[in-house]
Image: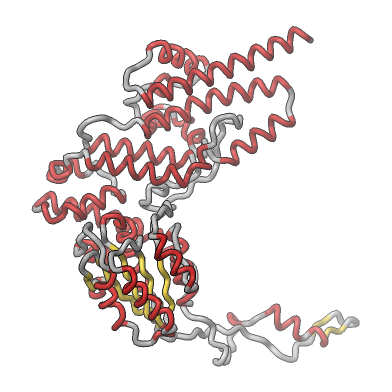
């Protein structure tokens, strides 16, 4: 018996050493471009010993290529780092014996090898000029990292938020592998930053001029930002390809946001209008409850004296939505998201949407609000900020304050702070709903001028910062 325990202890120690080898190789690769021969050889021995393909150690092999050759690994990458997988493993460890502990530790080594592959491919970006193929491969690998964290591809990078959710189905077992899902608020912006750096290192104009190379590009917030900044320098085939990428991205984001917006109908129930007496409006539960006094125990029957119907008519008072968005360099993703969001609300019945974009000058984009693609092509990203210019366009649009909501999206780093805040406070005092928003992104990260933040809080209109779903919820609450 003692010999068996010693053997199991040795087995556990061996698995721990293997896991450490895998992670030491990961750290060495991340912080030093030079290959460490000893770590590479040891990691190869570990990977082959646990039955995983050697291509996991090839930095040039994308996760897609690994999964194409070994389809059974796809399920292990999905949800690889979500908390649920860790909790299930800990429950298993608590209820099983030492032999099962050894099996769990072996599974941890396998999981560590898969985690290392995803992290290395994402956080060890290629040096020098980036090709369209390299960007596409990185985007695909970043999508696998997002899937490993239980998110949809593009969700953390602020792109097609939630386009496809991934259920936490990690099968690696063992909870000692680092649970990176707790770092999601930091990982999301970091992924966006890496992607933006790759896009900037591309010879984008040359790529766009070649339809075959342009076809390899996957639309993302970083790429769209670069295209919008450079659109005035493009022409011919390059401009056509740039427009096609922008429209693809707009359509994908719009599909997600439209689903969120249309989950509730517009207009509150109008109880002053009698309900229409048709069968589909019959309120069966209320009818039974109101007629319970007519129950006959002898006959076991309920006699109904009166039928009750649901109200379905909704108030249709027109609501005016005025969206003012900062289009300076720090607010690009908010500009893109809000332009799309405004177009969706503009498509709802009895909602009158106006859109204003500003930097040091303001532009009324209301005539194109139904087409976010055309709206974005008319923006001029970058520059400073002067909110008073936008306010001059917004104030005359407030005809009926009680039926108006003004959404102001900015980081509020203004040079005319006092006059701008006073005019915003005047909107609030008039009875209009004023919603200051620090960001409208998928990651929710925003830096807001503390001076404005405190004053908005004091007047009872705290800055709404965070996920775009928060803004959707606030607008639906006002408009329904």
The x and y percentages for residue 10 are 65, 11
The x and y percentages for residue 95 are 74, 31
Horizontal side, residue 359 vs residue 164: left or right: left
The residue located at (44%, 71%) in the rendering is: 475
45 or 404, which lies in front? Answer: 404
The residue located at (47%, 28%) in the rendering is: 114
238 or 36, which lies in front? Answer: 36
200 or 302, which lies in front? Answer: 200
The residue located at (31%, 57%) in the rendering is: 331
297 or 131, which lies in front? Answer: 131
Q: Quadrant of residue 370?
A: bottom left
Q: Relative to 49, does residue 410 appear above or below in the rendering? A: below
In the displayed image of the protein, which residue is found farthest to the right?
A: 298
The x and y percentages for residue 204 are 17, 43
In the displayed image of the protein, which residue is found farthest to the top?
A: 3
Q: Relative to 24, does residue 475 appear above or below in the rendering? A: below
Q: Quadrant of residue 463?
A: bottom left
Horizontal side, residue 119 vs residue 397: left or right: right
């Amino acid at each position: 018996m003692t010999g068996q325990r010693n053997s199991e202890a040795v087995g556990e120690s061996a698995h721990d050493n293997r896991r450490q080898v895998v992670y030491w190789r990961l750290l060495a690769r991340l912080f030093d471009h030079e290959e460490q021969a000893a770590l590479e050889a040891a990691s190869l021995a570990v990977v082959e010993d646990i039955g995983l393909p050697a291509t996991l150690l090839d930095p040039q092999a994308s996760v897609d290529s690994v999964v194409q050759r070994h389809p059974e690994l796809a399920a292990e990458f999905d949800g690889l780092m979500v908390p649920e997988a860790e909790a299930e493993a800990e429950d298993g460890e608590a209820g099983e014996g030492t032999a099962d502990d050894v099996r769990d530790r072996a599974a941890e080594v396998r999981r560590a090898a898969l985690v290392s592959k995803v992290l290395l491919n994402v956080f060890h970006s290629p040096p020098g000029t980036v090709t369209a193929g390299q960007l596409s491969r990185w985007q695909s690998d970043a999508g696998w990292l997002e899937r490993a964290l239980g998110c949809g591809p593009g969700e953390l990078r602020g792109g097609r938020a939630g386009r496809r959710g991934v259920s936490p189905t990690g099968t690696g077992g063992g909870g000692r592998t680092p649970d990176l899902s707790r770092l999601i608020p930091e990982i999301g912006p970091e992924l966006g930053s890496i992607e933006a750096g790759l896009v900037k290192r591309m010879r984008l104009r040359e790529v766009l001029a070649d339809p075959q190379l342009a076809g390899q590009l996957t639309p993302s917030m970083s790429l769209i930002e670069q295209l919008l900044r450079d659109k005035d320098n493009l022409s011919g085939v390059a401009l056509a390809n740039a427009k096609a990428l922008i429209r693809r991205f707009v359509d994908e984001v719009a599909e997600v946001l439209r689903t969120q917006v249309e989950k509730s109908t517009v207009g509150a129930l109008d109880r002053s209008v009698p309900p229409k007496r048709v069968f589909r409006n019959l309120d069966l539960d209320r009818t039974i409850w109101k007629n319970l006094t007519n129950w006959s125990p002898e006959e076991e029957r309920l006699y109904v004296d009166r039928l009750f119907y649901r109200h379905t008519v909704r108030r249709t008072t027109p609501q005016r939505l005025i969206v003012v968005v900062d289009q300076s360099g720090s607010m690009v993703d908010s500009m893109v998201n809000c332009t799309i969001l405004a177009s969706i609300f503009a498509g709802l019945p009895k909602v009158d949407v106006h859109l204003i974009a500003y930097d040091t000058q303001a532009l009324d984009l209301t005539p194109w609000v139904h087409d976010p693609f055309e709206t974005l092509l008319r923006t001029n990203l970058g520059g400073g900020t002067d909110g008073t210019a936008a306010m001059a366009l917004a104030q005359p649009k407030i005809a009926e304050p009680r039926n108006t909501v003004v959404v102001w999206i900015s980081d509020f780093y203004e040079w005319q702070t006092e006059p701008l805040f006073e005019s915003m406070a005047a909107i609030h005092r008039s009875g209009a709903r004023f919603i200051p928003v620090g960001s409208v992104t998928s990651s929710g990260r925003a830096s807001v001028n503390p001076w404005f933040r405190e004053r908005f809080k004091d007047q009872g209109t705290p800055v709404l910062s965070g996920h775009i779903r928060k803004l959707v919820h606030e607008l639906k609450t006002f408009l329904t």
